[in-house]
Image (tube, rainbow, N blue to C red):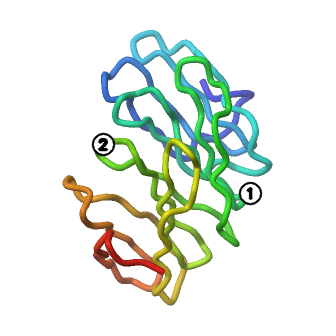
Amino acid sequence: APPDGARIISSSFSHDGQRIVGAADGSRAAVWCASTGDCLKILSGHSDDVKSACFSPDDTLVATASRDWKARLWEASGGKFAKALIGHTDVVNSAAFSPMGSWVVTASMDCSARVWDATSGECLRCFAEHRRPLHSASFSPDEASLLTASFDGTVRIWKMASGC
């Protein structure tokens, strides 16, 4: 069950299939045991609704994106806050790890996607040529390209070597 009856907005499995993470309204996310449904951890620290949550490829971190204009990284096992990814100027709609787990991409209502170092939390690249807010962003399997989807009805492919 969601924390305190909150509405789950998005959810995903850990890569080993043992846990589920869910983004919820009410500024929290939760991690559950996939086989029992028991709540293992509440990830609390955003100041507004959490829009998306996902595990890193090695299942050691969780990334959350929020209406509070931030994304956050959490230790998946203990639920401890690890890093804030701060730089967007509007709601962050999604966060996703790169296939190797070294980067996180965020997509925002500020019409940009940002790529962050998953260890330091430093913003490495900004892709901001859409005319409308972004729904989501994801990496190609080889991490050479980034895909963004926008409210402007377009999808763009960006080379990771470029950016603003």
Q: Secondary structure at mark 2?
A: loop
Q: Residue furthest bottom?
A: 131
Count of marks overlaid on the render: 2
Q: CA distance from mark 1 to mark 2?
A: 27 Å
Q: Seen in the image, is 33 located left or right of residue 147?
A: right
Residue shown at the point (40%, 63%) measured from the top left: 137
Q: Dot 1, crowdedness within 10 Å: few (<14), some or many (≥20)?
A: some
Instruction: Say which of 132 and 118 sits in front.
Output: 118
Give the residue pinned by disc 2.
Answer: 100
Quarter residue 140 falls in: bottom left
Dot 1 amino acid type: Asp
Where's residue 123, x and y in %?
A: 55, 61
What percent of the width, then of the height, locates residue 87? 66, 65
- Disc 1 or 2, which lies upstream in sequence? 1
Give me the disc on residue 68.
1
* x and y percentages locating residue 131 in the rendered image: 50, 90
Q: Is residue 87 left or right of residue 159?
A: right
| Labels 1, 2: front one | 2
Say if mark 1 contacts mark 2, CB within 8 Å: no
Position in image of residue 18 (x %, y %): 37, 17
Q: Amino acid at mark 2?
A: Met
Quadrant where the image shows the N terminus: top right
Secondary structure at badge 1 equals loop
| Residue at 53% in and 48% down | 52
What numbered label is drawn on residue 141? none
Give the quadrant of residue 150.
bottom left
Query: Which residue occupies 48% across, 81% down?
Result: 164
